[in-house]
Image (cartoon, helix red, strand yellow):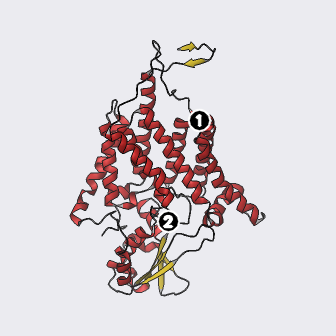
Amino acid sequence: MESNTEQGDTIRTITMTECDKRWRSFERTWAVAVLSLVAVSWKLWFGNSDFPAMPLLRLPTSYLRYDLVAVIVLVAALVCVAVGRRLSGRVFWWVFVGFSFSFLFNQHRLQPWAYQAAIQCVVLAALPRYSARRCFIALSISIYFFSACGKFDYQFLHTVGQDFVSVLFGPGETEPSRMRFVLAAALPVTELAVAIGLCFVKTRRLAGIAAMSMHASLIGLLGPWNLAHSTGVVLWNAWLLAQAWFLFVCKREPDAITFPSTTEVVPKSVIRPSHLFAKAIVFAAVTMPLFERAGYWDHWLSWSLYSPHTSRVTIQVHKIVLDSLPESARPFTGEDDDDRAWVALEIDRWSLSALGVPVYPQARFQLGIARSISRSISDVTGIRTQVRSASDRWTGSRLEVWLLGKKEIETYADTYLFLGE
């Protein structure tokens, strides 16, 4: 239905039913996307692996038996969102409860897509459609902004950025190194331009199209036909592409809905404590990444994506204790060039094989893995680790600490807060 304004402009009248159907379609797509991501990483969620689980807090062992209950609640609630006709906010609150306890029992589940989904389900549970959409936009802008800032870094520009350039433009033997550096730097510049463009209504649609193109390119780069990242990474980019279309590109409802029979606009809803809680969660999510470089917020929770500047731990075990390693870890040991008696355990490859997801890129978490492995080794000197800080943005240098033996690993691990037993 169309009506003409006094100025001769034509506007489309959108009924509440149309808007509700459109938003409900988005909620279903969101739930299907999250369920798909849980499905491709099911070993991480259902505990079918000997890869160590790292609780987020120190919890009594008896509490861990509720881990499966939390995951079942999460999956059941997501299914209700995906197939249900009419929903109340309570279903989304159950999704949030499932995510929260799942993270508590194993911080490895704080994959970027899962963290984003946990924030979004609070928004969907607590806020009306118009406020929820604005929060989704703010969260999306922060993801692109902080992801771009994390790539203005020596490590990215000389390693992963160069890999991306090689895939996009071919091997670089015939190209000047300066040109390859410029091409690598163009990647975060583009991402930052998308974030800035999304901040303004006039440029939002164009920036949304650019965001869709960027995710399509990442799917091509990271898929099994090129860099072969995990399936979850590819699916998450597919979901972000669809989300960009819905939030920024497709024709959306106006800020004020005009009904066919009246010019009355939709009244503002009453502010409730749940509204304030949801907005506080979003505010924290878009501001806490400012403290990542200072070490007060985790790298993935700061949208440090595809950037190798993160803190990490290298684990080496002596050859005489190889039989003490978990069975699924043994294929991922290799000889260390400095000392043939020691072999390095490649926990990143182990995580991808055992759980189908990248290892959580935080020294705290990886040191917890080292401690778990050390407890299964009878020889107190049969393991050593190298703890490396996040790299310097300008030089790529890191602070390094060697921990020799089980006792030093235990002592050093106990200095980290929120490291579960």
**Residue occupied by mark 2:** 294
In this figure, what is the number of numbered marks?
Answer: 2
Relative height, residue 181 to residue 201 (above, below): below
Relative height, residue 122 to residue 163 (above, below): above
Label 2 crowding class (10 Å Cα cut-off): few <14, some 14-19, many 20+? few
Q: Is residue 406 left or right of residue 137?
A: left
Which quarter of the image is occupied by the C terminus? bottom left
Label 1 crowding class (10 Å Cα cut-off): few <14, some 14-19, many 20+? few
Who is closer to the viewer here, 369 or 235?
369
Answer with the quarter of the image where residue 88 lies. Answer: top left
Who is closer to the viewer here, 332 or 396?
396
The three-letter code of the residue at mark 2 reads Ala
Labels 2 and 1: the sequence-earlier one: 1
Q: Residue at 56% across / 29% down in the picture?
A: 251
**Residue occupied by mark 1:** 201
The three-letter code of the residue at mark 1 reads Val
How far from the left and from the top, in percent, is residue 13?
51, 18
